[in-house]
Image: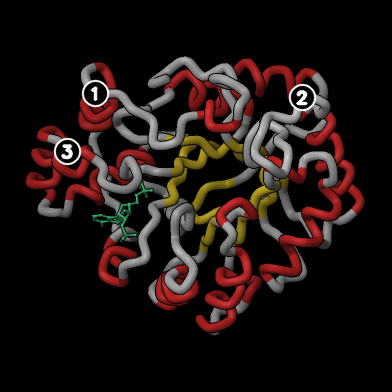
């Protein structure tokens, strides 16, 4: 099937299939990256309080001259803020200098203390309930809510205890971490899956992978395009390539259609070479229910 340039959320909102990721985009680089992306056709920007770059992302949006209402903007509730979501929301809006978020995600189901330890006094489900209350009370400030880094077990617990189905679950997805079980579950519940680290993050071996190279050669595109397109070709999935390099930012938007066999072949790379760019145990909460590539 040809790649759909837009993904529809369960709220009815449209989320562009390719967005700019900003995890690891350094201060002094990210404003330019966001401005460049928006000036060259991107309409979807992803950030997080944890990335410490929301203010610069906001500046990049302003510098681009693209009207706010034409942009789909996502940010995420930080782990140490899970006991006070209202203040965290206001902080993000202020940093981004925007009246509203198109999507507000719980970054991890892993409350943490300010000094980086697991905070076992907070249940992430209570935080989700707080996000739901804010979403219902302030539709002018939050257009959709969702989660990130949720496995099936955690999603099921959330669904069993919430009258709001998350619009999105943002997780790591690339050929060495395909997480098909989570994708299938989300699709069955009407939850869009957003792929972060689609290239495998910094210094990824996937850019030199033989299968990726073979498919790149067939279509005469860079290996990065095959990796980004893989996610854009998976039903119910959209994708956030991160770059701070002008040529790459521009190039990364040019996703191509892959055959079902190519999608399968790429995802099978995980059978012999699996890894995560972001292991959940950095939160102090263990594997958080993830089984693949951990
Ligand atoms: P940079 O930001 O310096 O351009 P991911 O999206 O999986 O997190 O991967 C991000 C990493 O991939 C960054 O190191 C980024 O470098 C690099 N990258 C992004 N786009 C491309 C591309 N088209 N070709 C090669 N490397 C890329």
Q: Quadrant of the N terminus?
A: top left
- Secondary-structure class at tag 1: loop
Asked if the residue under mark 3 is in contact with the one under mark 2, i.e. CB atoms within 8 Å, the reply is: no
Single out the mark in the foreground, 2 or 3. 2
- Secondary-structure class at tag 3: helix
Query: Of callouts 2 and 1, which one flags the residue occurring earlier in the amino acid sequence?
Result: 2
Q: Nearer the viewer, residue 228 or 63?
A: 63
**Where 26 falls versus 103 (above or below)?**
below
Classify residue 97 as left or right of residue 63.
right
Mark 2 close to ligand 1, CB under 8 Å: no
* Crowd class of label 2 (few under 14; some 14 to 19; many from 20; radius 10 Å): few
Residue that mark 1 sits on: 273
Give the alpha-carbon distance from disc 1 to disc 3, as whole Å. 13 Å
Q: Position of residue 82 (x, y in %)?
A: 77, 40
Q: Nearer the viewer, residue 37 or 206?
A: 206
Q: Nearer the viewer, residue 242 or 139?
A: 242
Q: Nearer the viewer, residue 178 or 165?
A: 178
Residue that mark 3 sits on: 212
Residue at figure coordinates x 42%, y 22% from the top left: 180
Single out the mark in the foreground, 1 or 3. 1
Residue that mark 2 sits on: 120
Query: Of callouts 1 and 3, which one flags the residue occurring earlier in the amino acid sequence?
Result: 3
């Amino acid at each position: 099937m040809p790649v759909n340039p837009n993904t529809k959320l369960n709220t009815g909102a449209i989320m562009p299939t390719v967005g700019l990721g900003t995890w690891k985009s350094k201060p002094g680089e990210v404003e330019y990256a966001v401005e460049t992306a928006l000036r060259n056709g991107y309409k979807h920007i992803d950030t997080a309080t944890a990335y410490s770059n929301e203010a610069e992302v906001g500046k990049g949006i302003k510098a681009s001259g693209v009207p706010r209402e034409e942009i789909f903007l996502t940010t995420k509730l930080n782990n140490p803020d899970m006991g006070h979501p209202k203040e965290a929301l206001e902080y993000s809006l202020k940093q981004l200098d925007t009246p509203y978020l198109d999507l507000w995600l719980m970054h991890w189901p892993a409350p943490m203390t300010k000094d980086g330890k697991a905070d076992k006094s907070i249940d992430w489900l209570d935080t989700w309930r707080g996000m739901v209350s804010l979403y219902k009370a302030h539709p002018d400030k939050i257009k959709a809510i969702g989660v990130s880094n949720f496995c099936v077990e955690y999603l099921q617990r959330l669904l069993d205890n919430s009258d709001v189905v998350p619009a999105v679950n943002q997780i790591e997805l690339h050929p060495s971490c395909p997480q098909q079980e989570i994708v299938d579950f989300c699709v069955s519940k009407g939850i869009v899956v957003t792929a972060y680290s689609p290239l495998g993050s910094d210094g990824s071996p996937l850019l030199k992978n033989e299968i990726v190279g073979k498919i790149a050669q067939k279509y005469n595109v860079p290996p990065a395009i095959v990796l980004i397109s893989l996610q854009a070709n998976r039903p119910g999935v959209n994708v956030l390539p991160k770059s701070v390099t002008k040529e790459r930012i521009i190039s990364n938007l040019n996703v191509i259609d892959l055959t079902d066999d190519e999608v399968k072949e790429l995802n099978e790379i995980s059978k012999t070479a699996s890894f995560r760019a972001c292991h959940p145990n950095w939160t102090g909460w263990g594997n958080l229910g993830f089984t693949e590539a951990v």
